[in-house]
C-alpha cells in the first residue's frame, strides 16, 4: 500500500498549510450549505455542529 500511504501523507501535509485550511473550509462550507438546502434548514444546528467537528478534526 505504498502509493495510498504516500497519498494520505501528502494530503495531511497539504491540509496543514494555510492554503489547505482555506480549501478544507470552503469544502466544509459548501457541504453544509448543500445539506441545509436539501433539508430546508430543518437541521441547521446539527449540520453546523458536524461542520465544526469536521473542521476541528481536519484543522491545523
Image (cartoon, helix red, strand yellow):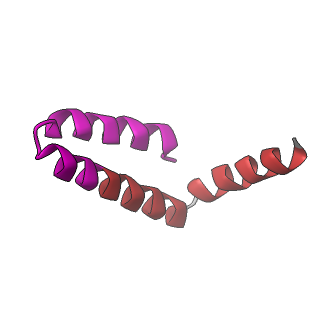
In the image as oriented, which residue stretches furthest toward the front? 38
What residue do we see at 37% from left, 35% from top?
Answer: 53
What residue do we see at 50% from left, 43% from top?
Answer: 58
In the image as oriented, which residue stretches furthest toward the bottom? 19
Q: As displayed, is residue 56 above or below residue 3?
A: above
Residue 38 location, x and y as percent? 20, 49
What residue do we see at 57% from left, 60% from top?
Answer: 17
Per the rendered image, the range of residues in magenta is: 32-60
Nearest the viewer among 37 and 51 is 37
Magenta span has 44?
yes
Residue 16 location, x and y as percent? 58, 53
Q: As displayed, is residue 28 above or below residue 18?
A: above
Residue 27 location, x and y as percent? 41, 58
Q: As displayed, is residue 4 above or below residue 24?
A: above
Left or right: 13 as drawn, with respect to 6? left
Specify the quadrant that holds the N terminus: top right
What residue do we see at 52% from left, 67% from top?
Answer: 19
Amino acid at each position: 500500500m505504498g502509493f495510498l500511504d504516500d497519498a494520505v501523507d501528502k494530503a495531511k501535509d497539504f491540509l496543514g498549510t494555510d492554503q489547505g485550511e482555506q480549501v478544507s473550509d470552503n469544502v466544509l462550507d459548501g457541504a453544509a450549505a448543500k445539506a441545509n438546502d436539501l433539508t430546508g434548514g430543518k437541521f441547521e444546528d446539527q449540520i453546523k455542529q458536524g461542520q465544526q467537528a469536521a473542521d476541528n478534526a481536519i484543522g491545523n
